[in-house]
Image (spheres, helix red, strand yellow):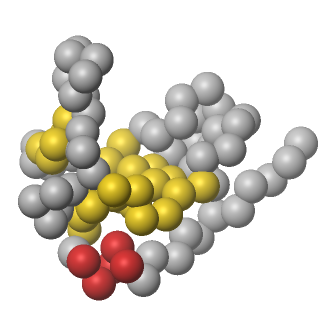
Amino acid sequence: MTTDKKKFIIKTPDGQTADLTHATTLRSNNLYPFGRHNYSIYESPEGVFVRGYNSGEREIMLTGFEIIDEATARNYTHTYTREDE
């Protein structure tokens, strides 16, 4: 991600980038404490769809991002549920 606090630019593990500064959140589940249940599905103004995910970090909301196709984004079902301690 960028250090410019006014921009929300992500980078995927394979090096792709997407500007989500003005993106629409299609759905999300970002509850603290964070964990694998956290995710967000974004649509950028340019029509790029991005899934943000959490790899199990308790103190970081989203730990990674991937670019996905529109059908996957619009029909996304998250595989993890929140497990309260």
At x 70%, y 62%, the residue is 81
Quarter of the figure with residue 5: top left
Name the side, left or right, on which 8 lies relative to 31.
left
At x 24%, y 45%, the residue is 22
Which corner quadrant holds the N terminus?
A: top left
- Where is residue 12? Give x, y as percent: 21, 46
- From the viewer's side, name the closer residue of 29 and 16: 29
Which corner quadrant holds the C terminus?
A: top right
Asked whether residue 23 is in view, the answer is yes
Name the side, left or right, on which 21 lies relative to 53.
left
- From the viewer's side, name the closer residue of 65 and 75: 75
At x 61%, y 26%, the residue is 59
Name the side, left or right, on which 13 lies relative to 80.
left
The relative height of residue 34 versus residue 30 in the rendered view (above or below) is above
Asked whether residue 13 is in view, the answer is no
Name the side, left or right, on which 47 lies relative to 53.
left
The relative height of residue 41 versus residue 13 in the rendered view (above or below) is below
The relative height of residue 78 versus residue 22 in the rendered view (above or below) is below
- Where is residue 39? Give x, y as percent: 50, 54
Count of numbered labels shown in the rendering: 0
The relative height of residue 17 versus residue 47 in the rendered view (above or below) is above
At x 15%, y 46%, the residue is 18
Quarter of the figure with residue 34: top right
